[in-house]
Amino acid sequence: MIWLGYTALTLISVGILVWPVLRNGGTAAQETEADQALYQSQIKEVEGDVANGLLTDPEAEAAHTEIKRRLLAASRRATGDKGVDAPMTRMGAVIGIAALVPFCALAIYVTIGAPGLPGAPVEQRRADALVNPEDTDFGVLIEDLADRLRQNPEKTEGWALLARSYRQINRLEDAATAYRRALSTGSKDIDIYTEFGDTLTAMNGGTVPPEAANIFREVLRTDRDEPRARFYLGLAAAQAGNVANAIAIWRDLTASAESNAPWLAMVRGQINQVAMAANIMPVTIAPRHPLDVPTTTPSSVGSSNTAMVPETDEDDFRPDVSALADRFSGDEMTMIQEMVGGLEARLEFEPDDFEGWMKLARSYGVLGNAGKSARAYRKASALNKDAIEPRTKLAEALIRAVKPGTPVPNEVGELTNEILALDQSNPDGLFISGLAAAGEGQFDLARDYWTTLLELLPPDNAAYESVSRRLAGLPNP
């Protein structure tokens, strides 16, 4: 089928080339007739000018002579164009074009083309090159570069290029060897050091080995802002169990990053993932540069050491952080205490900072100080009449503080009314409203709230089963 297409394209190409030759004869004849008609009309115009007295006889004779000269020249051109051999010449040109063009194209294709090979899409050829890099020209070039560097081993950039090439085809051990050779030349190139540490980490299955961590620290001693080294040292801290150190390093990295940095979302995702796994609120960890983070062993992070709990002084904005004693070292708890206390002190002078009060409320929630957490949520609610989150968090905190047999505070009912007035389908509002109603013995009202909530939640939602159990546990009407 494809040959029919090739034949059609060939005929079209030949036709385009032949048409001007075939058209030439008719065009020449038409041009001659047009010239003769033009010159005859000019002669008549001259005669008319003489009759009207516009030209004298000598002037008319000169005009006649010039017109006849032009007519004679045109006739001669026409005769030359229409010689007895002109049709034969054109026919020979037509035959030559029609015969030579397709045969020449075929000869060139057979000579330099590959008619015996099956077709392969571009993407397939690229995939084949990645699967079998050694069978491609790229693999040959890599080995050629390696041979030349063995003969001239002082070329730092050559070894770096070879290392990057090995990385591209996933020959990590060869890449590490090439990076070592590049650094053995005395190079202080930060990119080479960082790429070497990244390669060692990849060889270790994504875990930062001690050698790579030392390399990244050396990089930061030269360039304190190098983002890759800072990220990997945070990763090394997380992998060693020093979660607080990891979060501190990554928060410092994101704080100094430009808003359009392509890796910013990835680092923030790492912070959230590690913090959730360790049940830590990132805001409670002050940002620190990797070179400024104290080295802490995993055992000290997870051990309880009440002797190291920093002293509490509420009047001096040093909150009680003893709730963290089994999760952080003394130095880390001091850092958290300073951060939370500093935020609270700042809000005394900047009381209109909504986000600041929300951060302080969450921080005191982590520290187990329900009273100060509730106070901060009240401040945030007062600053933003349309904000649902501070109201739901405050209502939750108040309900958790209610002891069995104790009535639910009226403030909870007020908060749930405000939440549902802002959004009558808010899941948190419906859930808390049900809790408040059940706590007050209004079981029918609680049933209405929770039934509405179940209609909004998908069955695979984690809260669906919990609400269903609470609904089933209500006394029958």
Image (cartoon, helix red, strand yellow):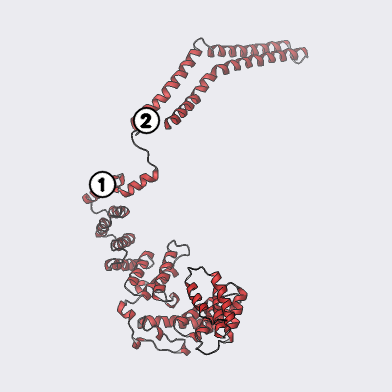
| Amino acid of disc 2 | Tyr
The N terminus: image quadrant: top left
Local packing at callout 2 (Cα closer than 10 Å; few below 14, some 14-19, many 20+) is few
Q: Position of residue 56 (x, y in %)?
A: 74, 12
Q: Residue shown at 59%/12% (left/top)?
A: 75
On screen, residue 288 versus residue 435, left or right, reads: left
Pointer 1: what residue? 144
Q: Quadrant of residue 27?
A: top right
Front position in the image: 156 or 307:
307
| Amino acid of disc 1 | Asp
Q: Quadrant of residue 382?
A: bottom right
| Residue 300 numbered mark, or none | none
Judged from the image, the secondary structure of the residue bearing numbered disc 1 is helix
Q: Position of residue 473 (x, y in %)?
A: 50, 80
Front position in the image: 453 or 341:
453
Task: Say above or below: 228 vs 69.
Answer: below
On screen, residue 444 versus residue 364, left or right, reads: right
Q: Residue shown at 53%/90% (left/top)?
A: 406
Q: Is residue 350 visible?
A: no
Task: Say above or below: 243 vs 412.
Answer: above
Judged from the image, the secondary structure of the residue bearing numbered disc 2 is helix
Front position in the image: 141 or 181:
141
Q: Position of residue 15 (x, y in %)?
A: 50, 24
Q: Position of residue 100 (x, y in %)?
A: 41, 22
Give the foreground label among 2 and 1: 2
How far apart in space, not on screen, are marks 2 and 1 (Cα)? 32 Å
Pointer 2: what residue? 109
Spot the residue most to the left.
151
Q: Which circle's residue, 2 or 1, is located before the other in the chain?
A: 2
Task: Say above or below: 85 vs 471.
Answer: above
